[in-house]
Image (cartoon, rainbow, N blue to C red):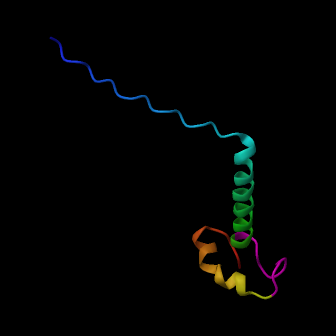
């Protein structure tokens, strides 16, 4: 008598993700990326959103590391 062949159980397919569900995440990540680029690359004294040079000095070394000129 032959031994029975073991058939692995079928895995259920993951449900599709609609654009309506994922678009808010894309928008959120895009806004965070734009703010990050602004604060690292453009937040300086002449056209700063925040008064003073605290943000500039906090991000100063990161600017040079990412090759953004700042002075």
* Residue shown at the point (39%, 29%) measured from the top left: 9
| Image location of residue 60, percent across then percent down | 64, 80
In the depicted structure, whether residue 42 falls above or below residue 4 = below
Residue 49 in magenta? yes
Please give the range of residues in magenta: 41-51
* Residue shown at the point (72%, 72%) measured from the top left: 39
Q: Nearer the viewer, residue 53 or 14?
A: 14
* Residue shown at the point (60%, 37%) measured from the top left: 15
**On the image, which quarter does residue 34 sit in?**
bottom right
Extreme-top residue of the structure: 1
Q: Magenta span: helix, strand or loop, mainly?
A: loop
Instruction: Report the number of discs.
Output: 0
Position of 12 compared to 66: left or right? left
Q: Quadrant of the N terminus?
A: top left
Residue 54 in magenta? no
In the depicted structure, whether residue 53 falls above or below residue 25 = below
Q: Nearer the viewer, residue 53 or 18?
A: 18
**On the image, which quarter does residue 50 sit in?**
bottom right
| Image location of residue 4, percent across then percent down | 23, 18
In the depicted structure, whether residue 11 falls above or below residue 32 = above
Position of 61 compared to 29: left or right? left
């Amino acid at each position: 008598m032959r031994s029975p062949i073991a058939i692995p159980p079928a895995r259920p397919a993951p449900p599709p993700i609609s654009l309506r569900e994922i678009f808010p995440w894309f928008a959120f990540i895009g806004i965070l990326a734009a703010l990050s680029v602004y604060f690292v690359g453009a937040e300086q004294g002449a056209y700063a959103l925040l008064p003073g040079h605290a943000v500039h000095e906090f991000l100063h070394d990161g600017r040079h590391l990412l090759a953004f000129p700042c002075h």
